Amino acid sequence: MAVDYTTHDGVAVITLNNPPVNGLGLSTRAGIVEGIERAQQDPAVTAIVLTGAGKAFSGGADITEFNTPKATQEPTLGTVIKAVEGSAKPVVAAIHSVAMGGGLELALGAHYRIAAVGAQIALPEVKLGILPGAGGTQRLPRAIGLEAALNMIVSGNVVMSEKLAGSGLFDEVVEGDLAKAALAFATKVGAQKGPHPKVRDRKIVHAEAQGFIQFARNTVATLAKQFPAPHKCIDAVEAGVLNGFDKGLAVERECFMALVQTPESRALRHAFFGERAASKIPDVPSDTPVRDIKSVAVIGAGTMGGGIAMNFLNAGIPVTLLETKQDALDRGLATIRKNYEGNVKKGKLTADALEQRLALLRPTLSYDDLKNADLIVEAVFEELGVKEQVFRQLDEVAKSGAILASNTSTLDVNRIAAFTKRPQDVIGMHFFSPANVMKLLEVVRGEHTSKDVLATVMKLAKKIRKTAVVSGVCDGFIGNRMVEQYIRQALFMLEEGALPAQVDKAIEKFGFAMGPFRMSDLAGNDIGWAIRKRRYQEQPDMHYSKIADRLCETGRFGQKTGGGWYDYKAGDRNAHPSKLVDDMIVAYSQETGATRRKISDDEIVERLVFALANEGAKILEEGIASKASDIDMVYLTGYGFPLYRGGPMLYADTVGLYNVERAIRRYASQPNGDAWKAASSIGELAQQGRGFNR
Ligand code: 3HC
Ligand code: NAI
């Protein structure tokens, strides 16, 4: 049973009991209506308390029911709220921990609301690409005023209950025992004559309602270009302001039904569940014991090491930072301080917090200082010889049970583990640059990595606020292995007729934060060059356009050398198309005998995105990633893939795998077609009418 019903001295208590967050699925909704009716029929009951068991009042509608028959089956949430609001006996919502979305809308249907201090209050639907669909756009403005409500609805952000004390939302915000306070309040109002107040009957008072709504529209137009939901939130609120509660409710309903079907909403829900699914590893049960991580050591205070250390300092975990030379250590420390000072300047951190964080940092030149660390993350030069030296030393000094992690981006984690006598304790923790900012952490599971090490690192990732995705060992892991195919296609298209600015523009219009050529100029074209040189040795039959090598031979490594695929002016990071480079590309095509043609923007997008999805499919087939949503999370959090498209795998599903396979076959028959080897699962899934994600 998803709802409990008890009585206490004339007060009926209806307790949502649908773990983990009392989502308002069908059986919970039905249970609430039953409880309300039962209370009406019991003459001994004078009032009703509505609350939630466990860790939430309610996290809202059950998102897993969306687009299933259960979502619209009666009693819908609208019907439930009507029953609550229509109760002849007063209903008191007793809110603790979390009241979000439909949960808050349910509480707004009650006659009174009492909240515990520390409860998170929000209408976060917009973050799922929808709008509050059970009266939230109508009742919240009536409860807390137009401006505050519209801000909450359009942003989806959490406001703490104590901040809303006195706003008109709560009758009381209590510090102590919520259940006791709610029972006392219910007994009191139960003794009062009805009718009891309804939020829907309140008026929205605002001297400049239309002006404010227009202001909100202008803001949304610039901030939420690709997302339809924020605009619809304003439409629904405006309808209520202009035409009253019932008309507003009807517009809200209409908008909700339309939004829930949009690809943007599907993508956002996919990301919500994908983020949570990423922490679930098929053969590592959720109750796997984890190791205690109370202190961390980082080796190497360069670009990555400093950022990695900051993650742990931010979470209050002491860090020992080791370098080989004092000047390198000093440089690393100065960069960390500078980054924190930047945060203070931006108002993101207080000066006190800065000092507290730095006080947790212990610089050293001696491996002896690492012997108490529970986790050691290596971020030294990307050379196997250097890694070997470091890991052999770690094996000597690290305490038994310490986790030894490498931040390598290209080397074989199994080989690194073999430098120690404890490969079960070795794992890859592949952070992205800048490591203190980027959300993504690829957790690389070696052949011998033990399950508790994996579970510990996944838990720790949550603590340092990363989105951790598990990858098996392969060249490039999930993200960089896929991006290599994407870059290959981008380079082939230059040879075949496109120019860097056209390619970048097309994929940026699709929604990528940055196209491949602007990205390479930022990261440094020499990095890709080094990888290709290795490829020429290791996989001589892998066909690569040599155009990027030509560029590198001229020393154009990107922003850092003042020029790459584009020209850069001193002190200006804007990319300006380079006549010199464009001429070089055209000359290269002539030299290789390629017939330059006009490549459409659609072709550019297809070739880039399908190259990602195709390699992603192979990664799934090989078991390097355990589910398609993991791959999407890598791309959404680490590679600037547009959130509203949900990642390369979901995008391929949206296009349809039948269509993806046809396109791949077509590209395989064009020049440079040997780069296209369709993953067999694409055709197989297409035949079954399935996608990667269902
Ligand atoms: N529906 C279904 N499942 C939900 C859910 C929901 N609304 N909210 C959370 N869950 C699930 C999660 O998927 C997760 O499942 P798992 O354990 O199987 O992975 C579990 O609950 C716990 O979630 P978290 O790991 O996120 O737990 P936290 O304690 O960190 O956070 C929370 C709890 C703040 C409630 C957070 O889960 C959250 O923000 N949930 C989404 C809230 C939301 O968007 N509500 C609006 C829903 S839409 C709606 O109400 C429409 C209405 O207007 C008609
Ligand atoms: P870096 O060159 O900026 O820093 C490396 C640091 O390690 C230097 O400060 C050096 O003095 C120090 N070092 C070298 N040998 C050492 C040793 N034996 N003991 C202690 N310290 C030593 O390099 P970066 O970019 O920080 O890369 C570090 C690692 O992170 C590499 O494995 C790299 O592949 C990986 N990585 C780099 C990313 C990037 O964008 N730069 C992204 C993800 C991973």
Image: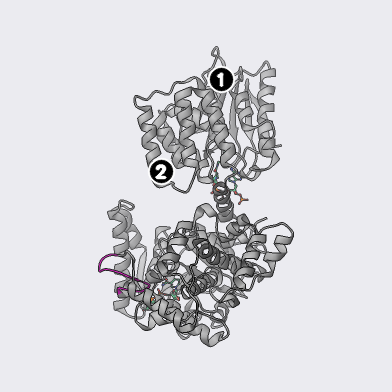
- Residue 304 locus on image (x, y percent): 40, 70
- Residue 645 locus on image (x, y percent): 54, 54
- Residue 275 locus on image (x, y percent): 55, 55
- What kind of colouring is applied to the model shown? one colour
Quarter of the figure with the C terminus: bottom right
Badge 1 or badge 2: first in the primary sequence = 1
Whether residue 385 is in magenta: the answer is no
Task: Give the magenta range.
Answer: 562-572
- Asked which secondary structure carries label 1, the reply is helix
> Which three-letter amino acid code belongs to the residue tagged 2?
Ala
Mark 1 CB within 8 Å of ligand 1: no
The residue at 35%/82% (across/down) is 554
Q: Which mark is residue 187?
A: 1
The residue at 43%/58% (across/down) is 315
> Are the residues tagged 1 and 2 within 8 Å (C-beta)?
no
Q: Is residue 450 above or below residue 249?
A: below
- Residue 498 locus on image (x, y percent): 45, 70
Quarter of the figure with the N terminus: top right
Q: CA distance from mark 1 to mark 2?
A: 48 Å
Residue positioned most to the right: 688
> Which three-letter amino acid code belongs to the residue tagged 1?
Thr
The residue wearing badge 2 is 221
Seen from the viewer's position, the closer of residues 205 and 327 is: 205
Is any atom of residue 370 visible in this view?
yes
- Asked which secondary structure carries label 2, the reply is helix
Q: Quadrant of ligand 2?
A: bottom left
Q: Which mark is residue 506?
A: none
